Image: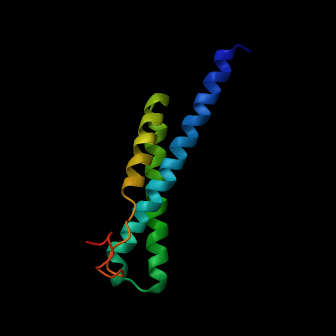
Amino acid sequence: MPASHYLSSIGKAATVTIAGAAAVVVSLLAALYAVMLCGSALGGTAIGVVFGLVALAMLVALGYGFWRLSWPLRALVGIALLAGSFLLLPRPTCAAKPQATIDCQ
């Protein structure tokens, strides 16, 4: 087999890995924010149901979207989603810290 075949297979495997990781991270982040926004209105077990349904729906939608894209676009969208999702992670607040600390001003 020629070397280009192996490089193509490695590239496709890397693209699938990046797209899969991006889909999982984005779906979990969307479910987290959905529970954070409507968690006070829900009961104990309903929070788990909402989290699971939102995560599953996002995973299915992103999986279908990635399936429809070409290989280079899958890689680009996967990288963009991963970078954007890490930028959207919740940040710790300064509410629990005393205001005299340097970081909380």
Task: For the C terminus, give its image quadrant.
Answer: bottom left
Q: Residue placed farthest to the left in the image?
A: 105
Residue closest to the far top? 2
Residue found at the far bottom of this picture: 43
Q: Residue at x 38, y 65 (%)?
A: 90
Along the horizontal axis of the image, is 8 left or right of 89?
A: right
Residue 100 quadrant: bottom left
x, y percent for residue 37: 32, 73
Residue 94 vertical position relative to residue 57 in the rendered view, above or below? below
Tag count: 0
Q: Position of residue 68 (x, y in %)?
A: 45, 36
**Residue 21 shown left or right of residue 82 in the figure:** right
* Residue shown at the point (46%, 85%) measured from the top left: 44
Q: Is residue 1 left or right of residue 99?
A: right
Residue 78 drawn above or below residue 59: above
Q: Position of residue 22 (x, y in %)?
A: 48, 48
Q: If the image is split into quadrants, where does the N terminus sit?
A: top right
Q: Tell me if residue 79 comes above or below residue 32 in the rendering.
A: above
User: Colour scheme in the image?
Assistant: rainbow
Picture residue at 48% right of the left edge, 52% below the top:
60
Residue 26, given in percent of the width and then of the height, sits at 44, 54
Which residue lies at the image location 51% right of the left edge and 42% below the top edge?
19
